[in-house]
Amino acid sequence: MVTIKDIARAAGVHASTVSRTLSGSPLVKDETKRLILDHCEKMGYMPNALARGLVQNRTQNLGMLVPDLSNPYYAELMSIVGNATKSIGYNMLWCNSFQDEELELKYFKLLIENQVDGIIMHPINGGRLEAYTRFVKNVPTVFIGDILPQQAIACVSTDNEKAGSLAVEHLYACGCSSVAFIGADLRKRAHNNRVKGFNSTATLLGLDASVVSLPEDYPSAMDRGYHGFRHYLKQYQRIPDGVVAVSDYGAIGVMKACQEEGIAVPSAMQLIGFDNLDFSSLPNINLTTVAPNKESLVEKTTAMLSSMIDGHGPGGHEKVVPQLIVRSTTIKKGEL
Amino acid sequence: MVTIKDIARAAGVHASTVSRTLSGSPLVKDETKRLILDHCEKMGYMPNALARGLVQNRTQNLGMLVPDLSNPYYAELMSIVGNATKSIGYNMLWCNSFQDEELELKYFKLLIENQVDGIIMHPINGGRLEAYTRFVKNVPTVFIGDILPQQAIACVSTDNEKAGSLAVEHLYACGCSSVAFIGADLRKRAHNNRVKGFNSTATLLGLDASVVSLPEDYPSAMDRGYHGFRHYLKQYQRIPDGVVAVSDYGAIGVMKACQEEGIAVPSAMQLIGFDNLDFSSLPNINLTTVAPNKESLVEKTTAMLSSMIDGHGPGGHEKVVPQLIVRSTTIKKGEL
DNA sequence: CTGTTAGCGCTTTCAG
DNA sequence: CTGAAAGCGCTAACAG
């Protein structure tokens, strides 16, 4: 590997002059600059970011940690973050915690050891976060996803309670009177908050509302939707006229059960999900859903993080309001 | 930030002893080790990976570059790679080229500057690769995805020609006699190879085969499927009994056109896609598809890369055979 | 405008 | 077993 010294020797100057040239300092004669750049080109010089990072004490790298890369929701979030950070001159170092809390902590430390200038962390939903309060003092960190109990940790979150409300309000506007929340995993903060919003708003609107809690543990959201809905049918011996599924995957599970039972969506029963995943807009699915505003989430996160990196203020807590996306699994009154 | 020197001072030893302790050298008395580790724990010491990388001339980081993070195919590939590399003690530095060739090259260089020990690169389909022949001499690199013309570049690829063959063979086994290939973008190597396999095998089997080339340019695969199929209907004034869509997204587009035209799948027309995306297995879609063997692809890639890193051999070219996944958009003869 | 010097945090000889 | 010293590639004062 050719270094700054090799260039200096070849060009007959000192290493510091090469360094200055490469960092665009005005303190070098144009002629020498050209000479040096010619040699760099010819010899195929590439700077060593480790050495630079070591002396400058910053790397222009940010880290991001997500729970599950194979979930399109996180993948898309990463993509949006990548786009946003690239425009402010940062590169991304991404890690996948595979929904494993130990790994999550390990990778978080790894990012710090690699001297990233800041971290965006989407924690595992339901994980324990005490360990992180120590670290966030050392490196600017913004948590993204759901609201956190820890005031000491900066975060930008989707307002899941609001999301739950939006879903019921829409079903109400679609003429539903008996609604069910299907598929929640109450160990997860996000699910809990959605249920909370669902319940309070349903009560407010005078709806007959029930939340199905599953006796068994199903790891996949789709299975929780499918079995949750079957559980409801068995327990109540009737069909609700509106169903809120805990996520779009859950809604797919509900749809499957409906197909098997011959329940027509939306004419016999209306259905709404959360997340607005990639597949939800496909013509064969076309699911009404409450979407987190990913762009706004990311924008607020990167803004907060860069102000923290620049030393302005400690971050704080911000909420982003989700949006209702109406597709063909629900029908507004009078539009039938 | 607390450094090795701070620990040394606190423990009353020299920095080199701390270093030895942390790297697990047997040349340190157990007692001193314990003393040092206690101080590390208490003072919250975290090693600086930049400094270590600089002196050791290796970072234990690998880089990976994909064209589009928001595409679940790449996201899942990344996830599998992450899992594989973690088990051999490497961390991943991921980059997203956003389908932009300039950005792709820029990030490739960035990875090298960050001194990754090796690179896994999924190039932009159809991009130009000459520029990379220089770099792959400096840092072990394996290209993943489609086969490359450059022998000098190590690669592990899905056999897309074989994939095209598998699709037609399956349609033939399902009793089709008139087949169409819909949605190809012939600037892409992968599409070209799929078409190639489709054509040669269709000829071999004596099928009536046509490849629709679109007059207009549609950036989305789904649109190419939708309009490609409509184009076929208009041009030939008949319905083929088997359709090979260039990708699962393309197949969704074909399905949409079928719904609009009242063509029943699979009874009136059978349909097969490529890629086996996340959504393809959903009950509402349940698409027959030819799947790249991602696990095998990744396994071969990481094996090749680590042998290159360890200095054994130059890599070479390897192909991975894709697999047919039969779902409900095709029906074998006699199974109706 | 350019060279000299010191040092970022760590590892790794070489002495002892 | 431990300390001293050199150096990885680069930047940033300080001289000149």
Image (cartoon, coloured by chain):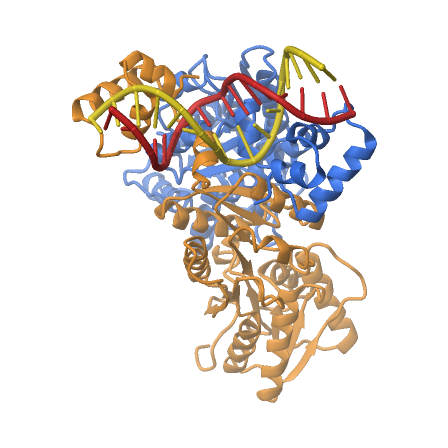
Chain colours: A blue, B orange, C red, D yellow
> Is residue A66 visible in the rendered structure shown here?
no
D6 relative position to D4: left or right: right
Residue A291 placed where, x, y %?
Answer: 58, 34
Residue B217 vs A91, above or below: the answer is below
At horizontal 34% and vertical 21% (from top left) the residue drawn is: B15
Give whichever of A39, B201 is nearer the camera: A39
Residue B238 vs B229, above or below: the answer is below
Give whichever of B194, A16 is nearer the camera: A16
Quarter of the rendering occupied by the N terminus of chain B: top left
* Numbered circles on residues, count: 0
At horizontal 27% and vertical 13% (from top left) the residue drawn is: B12
At horizontal 49% and vertical 62% (from top left) the residue drawn is: B314
Residue B319 vs B99, above or below: the answer is below
A329 relative position to A183: left or right: right
Residue B222 placed where, x, y %?
Answer: 66, 57
Residue B174 vs B43, above or below: the answer is below
* Quarter location, residue A186: top left
Residue A296 placed where, x, y %?
Answer: 63, 27
Give whichever of A54, B45 is nearer the camera: A54
At horizontal 57% and vertical 32% (from top left) the residue drawn is: A292
> Is residue B217 visible in the rendered structure shown here?
yes
* Quarter location, residue A216: top left
Residue B120 placed where, x, y %?
Answer: 52, 52
Give whichever of B153, B273 is nearer the camera: B153
